[in-house]
Amino acid sequence: MIKLDLLRAFVTVTRHGRLKDAGEELGRTQSAISMSLAQLEEQLGGQLFETDRKKELTDLGRYVRDRADELLRENDRIQQLIIDYAQGHSGRLRIASVPSVAALLLPTILSDFMGIHPAAEIELTDSDSASVRSMVDQGYADIGIAGPAKTGQSLRKTALFEDRLHVVCHAGSPLATASGHVRWQDLQGAKLIANETLTDIDASAARDLLRKSRLSARNVSSLFAMVQSGLGYTVLPGLATHQLSEGLIAVPMKGKSCDREISLLTDDGRTLSPLARAFQAFLNENIPTLLSQYHLAATDV
């Protein structure tokens, strides 16, 4: 097997025509370059240069130069691919996120991240917290952005922010109280259009409301349409209420268990890819600006 450093020394000499210049480029002495050429000729069993001046190549020399040049370029290309991947500059990253974060926070984050990682491939899936956690737990997503893991899921959690729950209702609804906020007890007796948000709330009042609800939907647009049609009210994180349909308002909730925690989730049993680690660091560094823009409360990381 011919060593690559022998071929590189030879190709460099053919390009410069002088041992001195080739040695300077490769950071080696003239004698070391000369020894490499001699070793290569010995392995090949033939001369590479017509004379000792290294100006004119033999037929074998020309053939070896052309093939070695191809080999070295491909070797350098592959080595750079490996380095880029190891340093988190390239690769494929699968992110699963709750819809509100996917729609409002991630576009800016991903645009900036891909600007400095142009070789990265990103696949974003938006779904409810339970589905996001399941995707990470089963290896279908590298990173999840959702509510914290439940018992039985070996997920590593990095808290990102807390999002106050809001009641979405008609502007003329009794729930649109003059005090500007709603408590759990205010929702008793009203018709709840259930969604996944309340399943993550550890409060007996929320569980009671879910048990009594006769209608549910997972898609935010569908929820808004149902509220608009007079079928009832729904409860969503504040981030999901920034683009309400006409005639609807979002009233913040007040009291115990009225905040939803959003965390970055990874599989505790698998090592993150370099690209996933780079994205996690980038997200932690840049999300505070977006939290301020949307008036969200950061949590301790």
Image (cartoon, grey):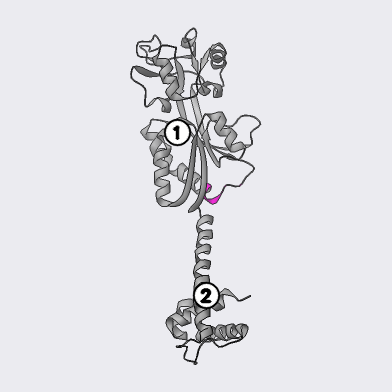
Residue 300 appearing in the image = no
Q: Amino acid at mark 2?
A: Arg
On screen, residue 149 versus residue 283, left or right, reads right
Q: Name the residue furthest right.
A: 152
Residue 3 on the magenta span: no
Q: Decide: is 28 above or below 232.
A: below
Find numbered disc 1 in the image and state the secondary structure of the residue it sits on.
helix
Q: Name the residue furthest bottom.
A: 51
Residue 30: x and y, percent?
A: 50, 85
Q: Name the residue furthest left.
A: 246
Q: Which residue is pictured at 54% across the width and 77% down the height?
A: 7
Residue 240: x and y, percent?
A: 42, 27
Q: Which residue is pictured at 56% across the width and 42% down the height?
A: 142
Residue 264: x and y, percent?
A: 52, 37
What segment carries the magenta color?
A: 271-276
Q: Which residue is pictured at 53% across the width and 79% down the height?
A: 64
Q: Amino acid at mark 1?
A: Val
Residue 67: x and y, percent?
A: 52, 75
Q: Decide: is 249 above or below 116.
A: above
**Residue at label 1?**
101
Categorize mark 2 by other alpha carbons within 10 Å: few (<14), some (14-19), many (20+).
few
Res. 67 mark: 2
Q: Decide: is 190 above or below 155.
A: above
Categorize mark 1 by other alpha carbons within 10 Å: few (<14), some (14-19), many (20+).
some
Find numbered disc 2 in the image and state the secondary structure of the residue it sits on.
helix
Q: Decide: is 130 above or below 186.
A: below
| Quadrant (top left/top right/bottom left/bottom right) for the N terminus | bottom right
| Label tally | 2
